[in-house]
């Protein structure tokens, strides 16, 4: 089997991601990380959904 290597050679149209400029993207990214941790067995399903609930509450508070 051939080993394949990926290398970052450049970034175009760089966008700063933070809770003020890209709040929805950041929320979905954090949620995806939590779901991945749950799928890998690093956190259990209950922990995952508790964290997602907290993220949702935080996002709602910041919008108000």
Image (tube, rainbow, N blue to C red):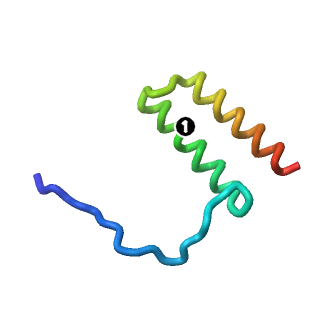
Name the residue at 35% across, 68% down: 8
Q: Secondary structure at mark 1?
A: helix
Tell me the quarter of the picture where residue 24 sits: bottom right
Q: Residue at x 71, y 63 (%)?
A: 21
Looking at this view, name the residue that lies furthest to the bottom: 12
| Number of callouts | 1
Say if 33 sits above or below 42 in the image. Answer: below
Q: Left or right? Give the position of 63 relative to 17.
A: right
Question: Which residue in the rendered view is the most extreme toward the right?
Answer: 64
**Residue at the image point whose x is 60% and y is 42% from the top:** 31
According to the image, label 1 marks what residue? Answer: 34
Name the spot of residue 44 as percent of width and height, x first.
52, 23
- Residue at x 48%, y 38% (from the top left corner): 36
Give the left or right position of residue 62, taking residue 12 as reference. right
Q: Position of residue 34 (x, y in %)?
A: 55, 37
Residue 39, percent from left and from top: 45, 32
Q: Give x and y (percent) for residue 58.
A: 76, 41
The picture quadrant where one finds residue 46 is top right
CA neighbours of label 1 inside 10 A, class few (<14), some (14 to 19), many (20+): many
């Amino acid at each position: 089997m051939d080993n394949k290597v990926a290398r970052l050679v450049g970034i175009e149209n760089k966008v700063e991601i933070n809770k003020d400029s890209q709040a929805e993207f950041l929320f979905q990214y954090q949620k995806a990380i939590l779901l991945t941790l749950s799928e890998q067995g690093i956190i259990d399903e209950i922990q995952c959904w508790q964290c997602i609930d907290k993220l949702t509450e935080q996002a709602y508070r910041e919008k108000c």
